[in-house]
Image (spheres, helix red, strand yellow):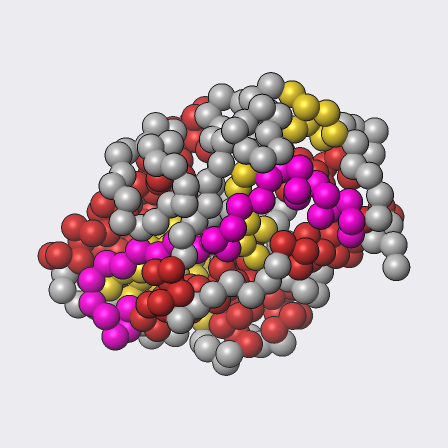
Amino acid sequence: MILITGGCGYLGSHCAINLLERNTEICIVDNFSNSSIEILDKIKSISKKHFKFYQGDVRDKKFINALFLKKNIDAVIHFAGLKSVSESEKDPSEYFSNNITGTINIIELMKLNKINHFIFSSSATVYGNQHPPPWDEKLKLKSPTNPYAKSKFIIEEILRSFVIDNKEFRAGILRYFNPIGAHPSGLLGEEIHSGRNLVPAILNSLIHSDEYLSVYGNDYPTPDGSGIRDYIHVSDLIDGHLKALNYIKTNRGCHVWNLGSGNGYSVLQIIQVFESILKRKINFKFEGRRKGDLPEYWALINKAEKELNWSPRKSINDMVYDILNHLNKTRPNLKILKN
Ligand SMILES: NC(=O)c1ccc[n+]([C@@H]2O[C@H](COP(=O)([O-])OP(=O)(O)OC[C@H]3O[C@@H](n4cnc5c(N)ncnc54)[C@H](O)[C@@H]3O)[C@@H](O)[C@H]2O)c1
């Protein structure tokens, strides 16, 4: 059985469905700090399968240990954690506690209970601003400055040390670039929150049609002057998790893979993809560059392609279509998609 921590969140819920559809036994732990109980019904209704759910916090050692004792768990896919760079700057200790203490608890209790397969959600933010793109796993990293990225960087270091002392323990570190997209049913997708990311900002501008979308920076040294990022469909990203889990079953140690599309798209290109599917213009205006934003980055994905026999299948159009389909289904009054 596989334990999915944070299994009610954006990525964890997609992972749960994927595993259930392959008839893999799973259980989910979530404290609902960034999700809700309704997600469980959606996972059930899409997968048409049963699974166990336990509400609780990964920092609660007693709770996690009881679960490990009770269930026959042989792998953990660890999504539970906080994910906003800007929030982490306001409350660093909450980010360190949730992300670092939560992960240490899980791996120590895994060791105690002889559970040896661990997949960790890291982030491209660990590359910081030290290297020009594309970023590959061999680049030497220095500790990043924002607390969110630092928490991921520290956990990666901890995992590398942990496997040296625990020869049977295997870890797969997945550095996500920008996961977007939604389940093709339209029932599940990322919650629209305020924050610095482009997709929620575009969706907010569609929901509040009187609002302009702000595009930060039109003078970057990129072909159209706007920032470039690497977007990956959530279903391709999750596929990478299952392949990574298979890999560590036959390969000891701590392994790291980038999960991105390997391509960069500019903010203006993404807006154009939205416009072509919506069949209308999006109102946007340029604003100055934001502190901390990089001009451009994308992944080198050869390592995951070669070692995991994985490659992303979904195009940028698929990603945007699925996002809009999810918005259409969850807010039908907006009549977002015209047939
Ligand atoms: N989505 C992204 O863009 C992105 C990019 C890079 C890395 N990541 C990492 O991937 C993981 C999953 O991201 P997501 O987008 O699904 O986030 P999410 O917030 O949608 O999901 C995380 C889930 O974990 C739960 N959770 C948080 N802290 C917990 C705790 N202490 N105990 C139990 N449950 C807890 C939340 O309630 C939520 O359901 C996170 O670790 C995040 O840092 C995400």
Which residue does the image show at 26% across and 56% down from the upper left?
Answer: 107
The furthest residue to the left = 165
Q: How many discs appear? A: 0
Foreground pick, 220 / 78: 220
Q: Which residues are magenta?
A: 248-277
- Magenta run includes residue 255: yes
In this view, 311 is above or below 120: below
What percent of the width, then of the height, locates residue 100?
A: 31, 42
Between residues 2 and 160, which one lies in front from this camera angle? 160
Considering every residue shown, the one lying at the far top of the view is 288
Residue 138 rendering spot, x and y as whole percentages: 27, 49
Left or right relative to 41: residue 5: left
Assign the C terminus to one quadrant of the image: bottom right
> Which quarter of the rendered picture does the N terminus lie within?
bottom left
- In this view, the residue farthest toward the bottom is 23
> In this rendering, would 287 be left or right of 305?
right
* Residue 257 percent coordinates (x, y): 35, 56
User: Would residue 111 be visible to someone looking at this image?
Assistant: no
Residue 164 among those drawn in magenta? no
Q: Name the spot of residue 189 as percent of width and height, x first.
A: 63, 54
- Give the residue displayed 25% in from the left and 41% down from the top: 140
Residue at image location 51% in from the left, 63% down from the top: 312
In the image, is 177 to the left or to the right of 140? Answer: right
The image shows residue 260, relative to residue 147, as above or below, that is below
